[in-house]
Amino acid sequence: MNIIVNLDVMLAKRKMSSGELAHKVGITPANLSVLKTGKAKAIRFTTLEAICRELDCQPGDILEYKKQ
């Protein structure tokens, strides 16, 4: 897939654990892990909005498109 998920980078920049973010956003740590590893096929805008709110970032800071 050409969409790269940089969630781990943003978590490191904000010094936040995956578990803490999952709790604040209201999703399971397993679902956050699926998103973080790039295995997710979709993400709800409400989830993306909550992640951006908690990490104080823009969607483009988390999702990146790369040509192959």
Image: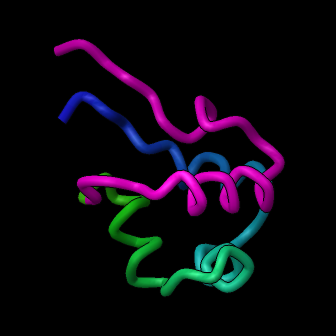
The residue drawn where x is 69% and y is 61% is 50
Q: Is residue 16 above or below residue 55?
A: below
Q: Is residue 53 magenta?
A: yes
> Where in the figure is residue 65, as x and y percent of width and height?
37, 23
Q: Nearer the viewer, residue 48 or 30?
A: 48
> Where in the figure is residue 26, as x and y percent of width and height?
63, 82
**From the viewer's perspective, is 26 left or right of 27?**
right
Quadrant assignment, res 64: top left
The residue drawn where x is 43% and y is 59% is 36
Q: Is residue 44 magenta?
A: yes
> Where in the figure is residue 56, as x and y percent of width and height?
83, 48
**Magenta residues?**
40-68
Q: Is residue 66 above or below residue 44?
A: above
Q: How is the image coloured?
A: rainbow
* Image quarter (top left, top right, bottom left or bottom right) of the N terminus: top left
Quadrant assignment, res 18: bottom right
> Where in the figure is residue 52, as x and y percent of width and height?
71, 50
Q: Nearer the viewer, residue 18 or 63?
A: 63
Q: Nearer the viewer, residue 22 or 43?
A: 43
* Image quarter (top left, top right, bottom left or bottom right) of the C terminus: top left
Q: Is residue 23 above or below residue 49?
A: below
Q: Say how many tags the image has.
A: 0
Seen as rendered, the residue at the extreme top is 67
**From the viewer's perspective, is 58 left or right of 54?**
left
**From the viewer's perspective, is 17 left or right of 29?**
right
The residue drawn where x is 49% and y is 86% is 28
The residue drawn where x is 24% and y is 13% is 67
